[in-house]
Structures are given as structure tokens and as C-alpha cells.
Image (tube, rainbow, N blue to C red):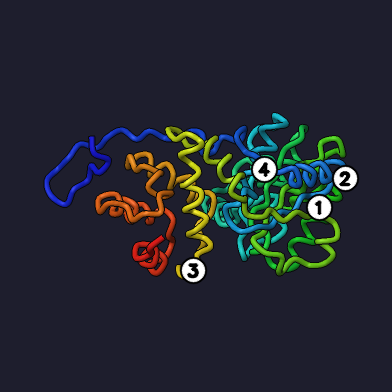
Amino acid sequence: MSFFVYQAEGQGQLPPFQPNFKLNDPSLYKPSQALTDAVNVALALGQPLLLTGEPGTGKTQLAFHLAWFFNLGRPLIVNIQTSATANDLFYKYDALSHFQHTQNNKEILSPDEIETRFIRYQGLGAAIRTDERRVVLLDELDKAPRDLPNDVLAAIEDLEFQVPEIGKSFRTTAENRPIIVLTSNSEKNLPDPFLRRVVYYHIPFPDADALLSILHSKVEGFSQEQLKPIVAHFEKIRTDRNLKLKKQPATAELIYWAMLLKKLQFDPALLASGKRAPAKERGLLQTSYSVLAKTREDLEAMREWEG
């Protein structure tokens, strides 16, 4: 069966989708020795681990890997927004729904009833409330207002937070201190007092050997030797100055691209031959670039590129 099942005319039968469960398997995460050392320092000191690096270097996936490695369940995730406050990292109070209930009902709710109906505990709050250790991921901290990181650290050091809407406070023990991973796409907007109280590590973009190892663990159907020209072509796309890409493809794009090449039955040897591929294969390769490109200009540049 041809990979292309959708056509401009007529009708067709939708084939079953077969997901690749290896893509998000935390057991397949491959931290470098330097990153492993940074994790161990953070664990020894009980400090948050702040990770920077370009998108696709595995910052977020580390939290899932740590939760899997220490058998701590799924990590508790807070996706930081530009309007976030310190309370948002602990709980959210649905004030509008509470107000509407008050307007439409005469009975007065108890604090426990208010908590059940209108309070939703978030990453740090959920971790502090539990009687076991958890991994907490605070993702894209650089989006936060400038004062938020310091507020977070103060709460982490105290291991306590309050919910004034129900008159309760929660505290955990040092033994149940959460493992906290913070990610940032840049170091800007992070105050110096905050940076002094975290363990910091910058994840560099993987080199060719690391990319090959990642692909070999997550993409089925290609041998390691077949994957080498795919990695080499990908690196050439990232480094060729003639392309002048606005957004460099990252590791995630490489994985999906290799998966697509397998579905297209594209021979990776054509990428390593140094010769121009036949017209049909060249057309397949140009089609595949839509996985790597993320802007119209980049896609057009790739399709015109004589790599």
C-alpha cells in the first residue's frame, strides 16, 4: 500500500494509526554524564534543578525520566504563564463558580465543601499536600513575572503554603521534599537571588553520536548504519549557512523525520551518496522537509536547497 492514502479526488479508506510508544518512554531517556552529575548535586542539596537549553534538548523529558527512575508516579506539571502568580503554582480557586453558587443557593458551604468544589491543587501544592515524595516540573519559568521565581523558592524552602479561601495551610516534611525541575529557554528575567539558590545546568544540543543513540532507541526499522546519513543530513540542515533557517529543527523533529522516511520507504543511503537523488526520491525528500521546517520561509528554503 502506498504511504499516501489521501488524494485530491474520490474517496478512500482511512488506515489504522499505529503510534510509536517509544517516543515518550521515560526509560529510554539518555542523560549525559554532566546532566547526571547535576541531578545528583541537586538531590544531595535538596535544591531545585534549573535547566536551560534550546527547545528539543530534553529539559522537560528529564522530569518524566526522574519520576520513572525513582518510581514516583507521573511528575506534577505546572506550565508557567506570563500572568502567573505564586498561588497558581500551589492551587487555583474558582472564585466565579463559588460566587455563582452563592447567588443561587441559600446554604452556606463549609470550608471542606468549598475545597472540594472550588479548589484545585496544582504542582507544588499537590506535592506538599501528599505524604510521599513527588517530582514537580515548573516548565518555562522564564515566562513568569520577575518576582515569581523568588516567591517559589521561599515556598520551597518553607515547604508550606496557605489557602486563605478555606482557612487552611499545608506543610510537608523534609523527608518528603519534592524533587523540583525548573526549565527555561533563556537565563533572562531570572533574578540573581533566585539563581544563587538553585543548581544550574545548560543542556547543549546533542552531538552526532548522541543523536544517533537517541534515534536508534526510538525509531524502528533502520539499522544504526542506516541512521548515520540521516543524522549527518540533519546536522547539515542545521549548520548550512546557505539555508539561513529562522527556526532550527530540534531532536523531536529529527525523530519524527526519521519515522517519516521509514514510512516513505526512503533509502537513507541516498542522503550519503553525495549525488543528486532521482526525481521520485527527491520529491519524497522535499515532502518530508515539512516535518523539519516550522515556517513558510524555512520550508521553501529547504525544498530549494541542494544539500
**Disc 4/disc 2 C-alpha distance (Å):** 17 Å
Image side of residue 64 versus residue 192, left or right = left
Q: Earlier in the sequence, mark 3 or mark 4?
A: 4
Q: Evaluate if marks 2 and 1 touch, with contact meaning CB atoms under 8 Å apart.
A: yes
Q: Amino acid at mark 2?
A: Leu
Residue 9 position in % (x across, y down)? 13, 50
Q: Residue at x 54, y 50 (%)?
A: 251
Query: Residue 246: which disc?
Result: 3
Residue where numbered disc 4 is placed? 63
Residue where numbered disc 2 is placed? 45
Q: Residue at x 48, y 33 (%)?
A: 21
Residue 124 position in % (x across, y down)? 72, 47
Q: Which residue is at the front of the view, 164 or 250?
A: 250
- Whether residue 193 is visible here, answered yes or no, is yes
Q: Evaluate if marks 3 and 4 touch, with contact meaning CB atoms under 8 Å apart.
A: no
Residue neighbourhood size for the residue with mark 1, other residues' Cα within 10 Å, grouped as few (<14), some (14–19), many (≥20) = many
Image side of residue 183 versus residue 302, left or right = right
Height in image: 112 above or below 69? Answer: below
**Disc 3/disc 1 C-alpha distance (Å):** 31 Å
Q: Amino acid at mark 1?
A: Val
Residue neighbourhood size for the residue with mark 3, other residues' Cα within 10 Å, grouped as few (<14), some (14–19), many (≥20) = few
Query: Residue 199: which disc?
Result: 1
Q: Quadrant of the N terminus?
A: top left
Q: Residue at x 57, y 46 (%)?
A: 211
Q: Amino acid at mark 3?
A: Lys
**Disc 1 element:** strand
- Whether residue 114 is visible here, answered yes or no, is no
**Disc 4 element:** helix
Q: Evaluate if marks 4 and 2 touch, with contact meaning CB atoms under 8 Å apart.
A: no
Q: Quadrant of the C terminus?
A: bottom left
